[in-house]
Image: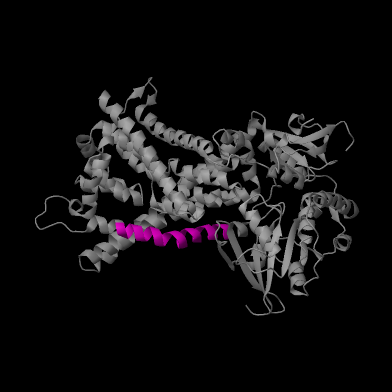
């Protein structure tokens, strides 16, 4: 590191606009990683100041207090205090405070000041403060605090100008270190009151717009109705925009594979390129549009301030199954795909609640299960009307969705019981002011999420896809073989081996074999069944072939298996990435396997006894 | 009176936050968030199910608190803020 590089740590309360300010300062030049040994996101960026000096900015996790209650708050505390292993001591701390919320934010500024390090205070959202008629005597605030104070508007181009100018200048002198004890902590509030009385005039304590919106958004009836409409629109968008693009991506790679195949001699290499490489890329990248569409909405809802409102409305319901209101949106997203759902759990502050949510998210019926459900229900469940109005096929599909939700509630409840740490989980959630989401901040967030998926997962998933291809291609069929090639492959052997494991739940070796590629992506089970049952198409023909060759009890068992089974490997890979623990991957795989096996066993044995 | 018993909309002033057990991090956090003696407080909304959680206005900020969290806070009513 050259001597002219200045390390700046950005700290502040949650909702102070710190991340928007960070985006404003660094633009797209950000590096997102994890802090050593923990799964807290580390965001660093750099920019060159007018003087030519390079400023390296670390965006520390937002916290209300240096008295840390969670792993991310501990990081903020330790980095600021200069004793986080592997992190250099910051040369300057920029404390960001929301100018409209100084009663809360100034206390943290005073707390940071007591660390005895050079601090600059950025009064952010000055534009909103002025609109609300809030008057702040900045020179007087600066004099009383003994810190340089600058005004910023993180959401406006050039809104960080005065901050850049200040940090580019001389590093301010540090205040003396002050002791941290209960009495001095209580004293901070008295100091904040004094500062506010002397320097800030507030016409009213909250924004009139927030009050008006919250009257509707938090209303016991209208609030829930608004939430239902918002969620309905999100899902419409996922299926109207995300899913078709995903299909186009999958088909596009299939098409490219075919064209590349035409240029290559037939043989294992051609098969690797077409089925392994292009097929695998199609599967992996096919997830991306759905993930991006879902994240667009999650980020927009988060930026606008609506997400905590939704959590407020649903907290009681989620608490009854051992979760928190904040778990709702990630779990709902998991009905489209568990990957964005699990990535979305970052908004859950309590690490225990977050882990529970991550572990149960795959039980939500994702869109990849639908082709399998559609095939099996179409083939085995007769179109019959129950009570004259309800279609039996529809009832079965509904029951499968319900099975996932009830299973998740059961797992949540059990996890609450067996957890060693039974201390109370706090909600303590701030409902910030509503804000117009900024396209730039949403775009940066989307880019980050997309890159995490592509960089961290593509390699793993592609590797596993190629492995799956290898298993189902080698060894090739012998001369004069009568059965499909896959029967002679390793996958065929594994399928035959697995049938002993799966016989008690009614799976023959063909079904067991189809479960192997289904681990890569559930919907491929349909194609695999088509292959082993020697059927060309995947539609009507396959359904009839299955109905003729698989007993009803096995088909029902297979449906239940897909509701709970530990799939797909992309989900397991994202659990590894988000929790940084193979143990959690093993727990997730293990409990879902046991649950799927037990449920399928019961369904199979009961169905067999009845049919 | 406990904050959890305070009727919606009624003005009150915080008296103190009690630890539910020794070294209660939730109580400490509540104090850090501004629930300290003399601070005006008001319940502005309640959750749709079982009246939980509470939306509490303290200072210039609104926090959602579960009833168990709000029960740690004792308040005075009928005092000019």
- Residue A50: image quadrant is bottom right
* Farthest-out residue, front: B22
Q: Is residue A571 shown in magenta?
A: no
* Farthest-out residue, top: A387
Residue at x 78% of width, y 75% of height: A170
User: Is residue A117 visible to us here?
Assistant: yes
Q: Residue A472: x and y, percent?
A: 24, 55
A329 left or right, relative to A5: left
In the figure, A243 relative to B40: above or below?
below
- Residue A273: image quadrant is bottom left
Q: Residue B77: x and y, percent?
A: 84, 31
Which segment is the magenta one? Answer: A443-467
Main secondary structure type of the part rendered in magenta:
helix
Closest to the observer, B60 or A574: A574
A593 left or right, relative to A291: left
Q: Is residue A465 shown in magenta?
A: yes
Q: Residue B46: x and y, percent?
A: 69, 33
In the figure, B5 relative to A154: above or below?
above
User: Is residue A279 visible to us here?
Assistant: no
Closest to the observer, A171 or A277: A171
Residue at x 90% of width, y 35% of height: B80
């Amino acid at each position: 590191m050259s001597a002219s590089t200045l390390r700046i740590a950005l700290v502040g309360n949650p909702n102070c606009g710190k991340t928007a300010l960070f985006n404003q300062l660094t633009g797209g030049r950000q590096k997102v990683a994890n802090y050593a040994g923990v799964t807290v996101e580390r965001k660093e960026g750099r920019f060159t100041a007018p003087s030519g000096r390079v400023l390296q900015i670390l965006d520390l996790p937002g916290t209300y207090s240096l008295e840390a209650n969670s792993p991310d708050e501990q990081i903020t505390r330790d980095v600021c205090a200069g004793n986080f292993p592997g992190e250099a001591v910051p040369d300057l701390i920029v404390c960001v405070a929301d100018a409209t919320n100084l009663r809360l934010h100034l206390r943290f500024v005073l707390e940071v000041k007591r660390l005895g390090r050079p601090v600059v205070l950025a009064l952010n959202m000055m534009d909103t403060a002025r609109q609300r008629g809030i008057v702040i005597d900045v020179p007087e605030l600066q004099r009383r605090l003994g810190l340089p104070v600058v005004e910023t508007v993180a959401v406006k181009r050039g809104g960080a100008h005065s901050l850049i100018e200040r940090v580019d200048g001389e590093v301010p002198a540090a205040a003396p270190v002050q002791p941290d004890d209960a009495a001095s902590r209580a004293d901070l509030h008295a100091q904040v009151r004094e500062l506010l009385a002397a320097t800030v005039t507030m016409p009213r304590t909250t924004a009139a717009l927030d009050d008006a919106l919250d009257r509707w958004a938090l209303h016991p009836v209208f609030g829930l109705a608004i939430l239902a409409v918002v969620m309905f629109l999100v899902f419409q968008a996922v299926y109207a925009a995300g899913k078709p693009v995903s299909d186009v991506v999958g088909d596009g790679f299939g098409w490219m594979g075919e064209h590349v195949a035409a240029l290559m001699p037939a043989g294992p290499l051609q098969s690797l390129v077409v089925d392994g490489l292009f097929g695998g890329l199609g599967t992996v990248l096919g997830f991306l549009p759905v993930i991006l569409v879902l994240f667009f909405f999650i980020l927009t809802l988060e930026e606008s301030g609506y997400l905590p409102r939704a959590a407020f409305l649903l907290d009681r319901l989620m608490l009854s199954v051992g979760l928190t209101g904040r778990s709702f949106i990630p779990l709902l997203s998991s009905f489209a795909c568990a990957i964005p759902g699990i990535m979305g759990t970052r908004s859950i502050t309590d690490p225990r609640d977050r882990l529970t949510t991550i572990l149960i998210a795959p039980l939500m019926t994702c869109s990849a299960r639908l082709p399998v459900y559609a095939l099996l229900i179409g083939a085995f469940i007769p179109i019959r009307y129950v009570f004259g109005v309800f279609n039996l096929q529809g009832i079965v599909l509904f029951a499968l969705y319900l099975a996932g939700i009830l299973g998740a509630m059961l797992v949540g409840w059990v996890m609450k019981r067996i957890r060693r740490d039974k201390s109370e989980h706090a909600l303590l959630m701030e409902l910030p002011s509503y804000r117009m989401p900024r396209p730039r901040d949403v775009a940066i967030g989307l880019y980050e999420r997309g890159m995490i998926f592509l960089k961290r997962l593509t390699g793993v998933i592609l590797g596993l896809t190629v492995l799956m291809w290898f298993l189902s291609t080698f060894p090739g069929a012998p001369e004069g073989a009568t059965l499909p090639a896959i029967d002679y492959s390793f996958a065929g052997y594994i399928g035959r081996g697995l049938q002993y494991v799966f016989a008690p739940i009614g799976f023959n070796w063909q079904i067991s074999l189809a479960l192997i590629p289904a681990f890569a992506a559930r919907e491929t089970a349909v194609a695999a069944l088509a292959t082993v049952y020697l059927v060309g198409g995947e539609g009507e023909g396959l359904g009839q072939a299955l109905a003729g060759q698989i007993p009803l009890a096995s088909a029902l068992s297979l449906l239940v298996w897909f509701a709970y089974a530990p799939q797909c490997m992309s989900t397991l890979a994202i659990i590894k990435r988000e929790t940084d623990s193979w143990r959690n991957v093993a727990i997730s795989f293990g409990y879902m396997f046991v649950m799927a096996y037990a449920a399928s066993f019961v369904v199979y044995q009961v169905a067999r006894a009845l049919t | 009176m406990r904050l959890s018993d305070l009727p919606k909309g009624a003005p009150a002033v915080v008296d103190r936050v009690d630890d539910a057990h020794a070294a209660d991090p939730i109580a400490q956090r509540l104090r850090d968030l501004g629930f300290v003696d003399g601070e005006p407080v008001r319940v502005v909304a309640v959750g749709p199910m079982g009246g939980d959680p509470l939306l509490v206005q303290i200072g210039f900020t609104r926090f959602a608190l579960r009833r168990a969290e709000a029960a740690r806070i004792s308040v005075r009513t009928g005092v000019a803020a």
